[in-house]
Image (spheres, rainbow, N blue to C red):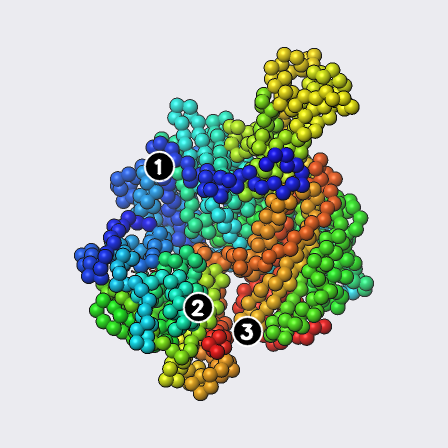
């Protein structure tokens, strides 16, 4: 790791000031991506602005038909929250599938979506559930927020404050983990909203990060059953290929995970 | 604690310090005025170095020195050696290219060290290493061993035309050819043994301290064999004569073979500590470990098995290409030859065997011994082809194996080894019973009803441990003898120190070796200390690898204990005015048989040291040393049975049951043995399902971190069922065979045989990733039970 200066902000405003006052700063969430990257000397911010002390980023609350989760909420808190388990059990399950206990106790939802790793789990839930991301300056739909592999719509100094998930009628997540990293090789989140529309989003497989699968959404809107998606495959041409799996194999996994997610949603 | 002798499940004495975080590892060593080393490493797999510019690094305050191969050569530091001479079948010696601890002309693998920075802090050393500018002219690289042999392939070393290190053979080609000419069935397979990265929990490290006034060096290092390290550093690398070099291997967090070898970094740390006049510490980071710890395996083999009309094996022909990487590591030449092809007879009576091994240079990390070293490669070839042959001729794999088992001992194989003892039916019977082999068809059809493919695979392994009779290995090219030493020191108060040349880096020697003493004298294990890992404290010894610490290291201790016991009995007889033959040792007391006369062990010890009343002519003291040179290898063997369920949708394999039935001869501490088997099985399952050192065609290691190198985790493996049977090894006093590597040796073929059975397709390479299994299984629908 290169030398860095550590700052702990107590409000969103203070964090923003510390950030803009530095020649090269980075926000620090749970540090589960940023710190390992710094240890490998692949990132070398002059200043680290820790968001962990900001109250506005904390908390999980039910809020007029939606579930609002502060950006600083850890994966462990999402996985074990009674409110999340009651309202969107698929989301609690997803959080429980992230990394290992140490990672879940430190890593945060804000950090995960700001990083937008193409193999991260949360992006699929945000897109499938039609979530809204509240930042220090604006509100964005999930699809506006995620713009490509490791890319988001966030400005340099913009801070994710919270994510609001409309409560669906039902939803579920099914993940096939990479055998080494245990990130998603393919993870599919399916959701049926209270008005009957269906959204299906896949992570881990796409070259540009999370993507929706229109053909599956249509099929499920007509018949909500695992069989409805069993014959639908995504185009392998747009998928990732690496030492763990070819694009063709990932395409298979997307279909299998979609089937399993639908079955799990019931 | 208390008296815990042979067979006791004594808790590990060393665990208090390990579990409470109080172990003392090399990186814990902090010396006054210590500096830190960081290496500048090649980003290319093959390139000419055109210039090294260290000026910017040298200007950074706190940087002591930037050293390159030029200074190293000028100071007379020797090239790295290979300690085992192998000759090609035409009689010519192996073709070995030069390996310098710091390369200044041509780099031959990614991560090779080209310079070292010595600085006040580790961070600074790394920053300065980044500031060293090295200009490279890239050369074409080659990573596949078979491609490296082809005309026109990039050439690594002028000493090795066509990248061929040796073209070696063993066995009788003519009689093998004759067996094939008259065979009624021939099974032929192409078999690959995937390259692995050892990944001990503690990465390598060195702290080197040069004392100017005494012209003496001390090296703290992560070594499995500190005396051998000292010998090689002295005799070949010219760092210092042996009496001016102390090597200490303190607590070491795992080795699996990778810490046998003396690497460039340890040599450079010693040399640099004299150059800068301050202690130098180097600690490998995980990326350096992936790139520079000697890798394991990496064989490509074509194997053919000849059967007669009764399905009796008549001949076995094996051609292997072994990838040794960019340089010949310390024992690299022995691994694909004498540790591999000598085991190709497996548990079977095979009249004719011929093997040919070509060892090849490529632009990859050097390959050397890794848990099992040659024997996992042999076992994989043998047990895959045995299983396949049985399937091809329509015989049950159990009956086919039984029909070909070796049943009378000693058994001379056609490939040097002479098996001394064993009972292959006993381990096979035990494994089949434990896994409920007969109930498998019902379980298979039940799994099919859930859409899962269930398979059963066996592996009947035999391996060679206790490495090895010195004269025998000497005649085969080894540069060292492979005996072991021990000294038993009874203190005047009766406590006992055992100085052993073996080295414990996870094996629990402090417990097991103490149990030997406890058994012998009836004293508590808490009164026994095992001393190892310091060349200033312990007499020369050969260290720990090849599952030798029990069969060889403990045999040396037994010999020393015999001498101590004899002397103690003489003293007791003298003091109690009895005849020596009447003295018995029981519960820490020496008694005169048939009387109530007795003296405690500590009273005898004190008498030995006060020397007021010793038998006529006896020297004072109670301290004896011994060297033990084994008379043969030892031959652990067993049967592993693996039951898997494959998810045909994803290709994911789950091991639902795994039985290991091992014959390790005499077992001292069953708990520790089980731990060794658990670890070995898990490494073997890791190789079979997950682990792979993958290079791209330019020689970049794609799996150079845990994001991409899949280590087995607890949830990848089942709860193992372990059983042991016992035939004593006739070659050593305790009858021990060794247990450290068997799990890693025997398990991969059991797993692959099970998966190929489940998916009904025999064409499956390791690691059997989900995608590979998915592809191989497509079309193979769940079958009803036979
Ligand atoms: C061993 C391991 C296994 C893992 N496995 C998984 C897995 O299976 N699935 C998965 O999805 N993830 C996995 N992760 C990643 C983990 O979920 C991280 O927690 C997450 O990606 C980043 O969150 P963080 O809070 O740790 O952010 P940090 O690492 O602190 O920051 C990540 C990035 O986000 C920025 N950032 C952080 N918070 C905010 C904010 N509120 N507003 C704006 N920018 C912000 C930072 O500046 C930085 O650029 C794993 C990580 C590890 C170490």
**Callout 2: CB less than 8 Å from ligand 1:** no
Q: Are marks 3 and 2 in contact (CB under 8 Å)?
A: no
Residue closest to the far right: B310
Residue B86 or residue A119, whichever sits in front:
A119
Residue A218 shows up from this direction: yes
Numbered circles on residues, count: 3
Q: Are marks 1 and 2 on the same chain?
A: no
Label 1 marks a residue whose chain is B
Residue B354, image x, y percentages:
70, 53
Using residue B122 as the reference point, say whether residue B539 is left or right of it. Answer: right
- Quarter placement of the N terminus of chain B: top right
Above or below: residue B129 compared with residue B537: below
Q: Position of residue B230 (x, y in %)?
A: 51, 33
> What residue did someone put label 3 on?
B649
Q: Quadrant of residue B206?
A: top left
Residue B35 circle label: 1
- Mark 1 or 2: in front is 2
- Secondary structure found at label 3: loop
Label 2: which secondary element: helix
The residue that disc 2 covers is A93
Q: Residue at x 40, y 67 (%)?
A: A82
**Among all residues in the image, which is located at the extreme bottom?**
A222
**Label ID, residue B64:** none
Residue appearing at x 49%, y 33% in the figure: B247
Q: Is residue B113 left or right of residue B671?
A: left
* Disc 3 from disc 2: Cα separation: 22 Å
């Amino acid at each position: 790791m290169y030398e860095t200066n550590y700052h702990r902000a107590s409000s969103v405003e203070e964090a923003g000031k510390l950030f803009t006052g530095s020649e090269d700063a980075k926000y620090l969430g749970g540090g589960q991506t940023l710190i390992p990257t710094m240890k490998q000397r692949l990132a070398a911010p002059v200043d680290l602005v820790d968001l962990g002390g900001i109250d506005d980023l904390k908390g999980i609350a039910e809020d007029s038909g939606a579930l609002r989760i502060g950006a600083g909420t850890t994966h462990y808190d999402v996985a074990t929250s009674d409110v999340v388990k009651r309202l969107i059990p698929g989301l609690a399950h997803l959080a429980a599938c992230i990394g290992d206990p140490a990672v879940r106790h430190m890593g945060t939802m804000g950090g995960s979506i700001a990083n937008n790793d193409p193999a991260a789990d949360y992006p699929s839930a945000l897109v499938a559930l039609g979530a809204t991301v509240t930042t220090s300056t604006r509100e964005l739909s999930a699809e506006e927020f995620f713009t490509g592999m490791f890319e988001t719509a966030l400005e340099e100094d913009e801070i994710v404050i919270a994510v609001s998930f409309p409560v669906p009628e039902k939803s579920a997540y099914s993940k096939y983990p990479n055998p080494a990293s245990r990130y998603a090789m393919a993870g599919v989140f399916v959701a049926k909203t209270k008005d009957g529309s269906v959204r299906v989003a896949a992570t881990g497989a796409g070259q540009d990060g999370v993507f929706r699968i229109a053909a599956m959404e249509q099929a499920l809107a007509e018949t909500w059953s695992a069989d409805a998606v069993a014959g639908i495959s995504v185009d392998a041409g747009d998928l990732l290929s690496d030492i763990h799996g070819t694009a063709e194999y990932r395409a298979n996994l997307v279909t299998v995970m979609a089937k399993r997610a639908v079955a799990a949603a019931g | 604690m208390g008296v815990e002798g042979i067979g006791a499940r004594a808790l590990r004495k060393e665990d208090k310090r390990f579990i409470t975080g109080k172990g003392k590892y090399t990186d814990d060593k902090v010396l006054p005025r210590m500096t830190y080393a960081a290496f500048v490493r090649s980003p290319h797999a093959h390139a000419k170095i055109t210039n090294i510019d260290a000026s910017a690094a040298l200007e950074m305050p706190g940087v002591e020195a930037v050293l390159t191969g030029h200074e190293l050569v000028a100071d007379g530091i020797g090239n790295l050696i290979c300690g085992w001479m192998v000759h090609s079948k035409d009689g010519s010696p192996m073709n070995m290219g030069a390996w310098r601890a710091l390369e200044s002309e041509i780099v031959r693998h990614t991560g090779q060290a080209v310079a070292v920075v010595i600085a006040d802090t580790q961070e600074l050393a790394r920053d300065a290493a980044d500031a060293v500018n090295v200009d490279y002219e890239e050369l074409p690289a080659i990573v596949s061993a078979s491609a490296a042999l082809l005309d026109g392939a990039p050439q690594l070393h002028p000493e090795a035309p066509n990248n061929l290190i040796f073209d070696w053979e063993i066995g009788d080609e003519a009689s093998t050819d004759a067996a094939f000419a008259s065979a009624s069935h021939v099974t032929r397979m192409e078999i690959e043994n995937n390259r692995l990265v050892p990944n001990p929990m503690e990465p390598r490290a060195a702290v080197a301290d040069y004392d100017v006034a005494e012209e003496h060096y001390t090296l703290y290092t992560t070594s499995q064999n500190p005396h051998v390290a000292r010998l090689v550093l002295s005799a070949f690398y010219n760092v210092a004569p042996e009496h001016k070099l102390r090597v200490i291997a303190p607590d070491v967090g795992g080795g699996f073979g990778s810490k046998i070898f003396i690497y460039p970094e340890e040599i450079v740390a010693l040399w640099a500590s004299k150059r800068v006049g301050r202690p130098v510490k180097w600690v490998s980071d995980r990326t350096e470990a992936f790139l520079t710890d000697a890798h394991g395996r990496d064989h490509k083999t074509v194997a053919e098995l000849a059967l007669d009309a009764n399905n009796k094996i008549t001949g076995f022909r094996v051609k292997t290409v072994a990838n040794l990487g960019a340089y010949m590591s310390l024992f690299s030449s022995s691994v694909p030859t004498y540790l591999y092809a000598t085991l190709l007879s497996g548990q079977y009576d095979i009249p004719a065997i011929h093997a040919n091994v070509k060892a090849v240079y490529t632009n990859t990390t050097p390959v050397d011994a890794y848990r099992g070293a040659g024997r996992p490669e042999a076992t994989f070839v043998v047990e895959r082809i045995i299983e396949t042959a049985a399937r091809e001729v329509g015989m049950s794999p159990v009956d086919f194996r039984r029909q070909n088992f070796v049943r009378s001992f000693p058994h001379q194989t056609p490939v040097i080894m002479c098996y001394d003892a064993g009972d292959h039916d006993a381990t096979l019977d035990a494994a089949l019973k434990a896994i409920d082999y007969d109930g498998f068809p019902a379980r298979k059809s039940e799994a099919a009803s859930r859409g899962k493919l269930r398979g059963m695979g066996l592996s009947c392994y035999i391996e060679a441990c206790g490495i090895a009779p010195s004269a025998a290995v000497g005649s085969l090219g080894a540069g060292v003898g492979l005996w072991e030493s021990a000294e038993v020191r009874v203190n005047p108060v009766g406590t006992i120190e055992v100085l052993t040349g073996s080295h414990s880096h996870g094996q629990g020697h402090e417990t097991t070796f103490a149990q030997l003493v406890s058994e012998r004298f009836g004293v508590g294990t808490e009164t026994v200390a095992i001393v190892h890992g310091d060349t200033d404290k312990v007499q020369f010894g050969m260290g720990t690898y090849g599952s030798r610490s029990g069969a060889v290291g403990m045999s040396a201790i037994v010999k020393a204990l015999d001498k101590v016991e004899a002397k103690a009995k003489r003293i007791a007889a003298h003091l109690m005015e009895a005849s020596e033959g009447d003295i018995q040792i029981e519960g820490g007391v020496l008694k005169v048989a048939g009387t109530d006369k007795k003296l405690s062990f500590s009273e005898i010890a004190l008498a030995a040291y006060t020397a007021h009343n010793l038998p006529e002519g006896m020297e004072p003291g109670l301290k004896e040393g011994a060297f033990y040179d084994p008379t043969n290898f030892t031959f652990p063997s067993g049967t592993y049975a693996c039951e898997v369920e494959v998810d045909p949708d994803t290709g994911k394999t789950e091991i639902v049951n795994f039985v290991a039935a091992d014959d390790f001869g005499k077992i001292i501490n069953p708990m520790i043995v089980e731990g060794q088997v658990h670890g070995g099985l898990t490494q073997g399952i890791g190789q079979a399902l997950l682990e792979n050192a993958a290079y791209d065609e330019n020689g970049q290691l794609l799996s150079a971190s845990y994001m991409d190198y899949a280590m087995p985790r607890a949830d990848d493996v089942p709860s193992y069922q372990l059983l042991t049977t016992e035939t004593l090894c006739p070659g050593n006093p305790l009858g021990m065979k060794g247990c450290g590597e068997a799990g890693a040796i025997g398990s991969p073929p059991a797993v692959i045989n099970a998966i190929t059975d489940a998916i009904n397709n025999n064409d499956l390479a390791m690691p059997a990733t989900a995608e590979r299994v998915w592809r191989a299984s497509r079309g193979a629908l769940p079958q009803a039970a036979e």
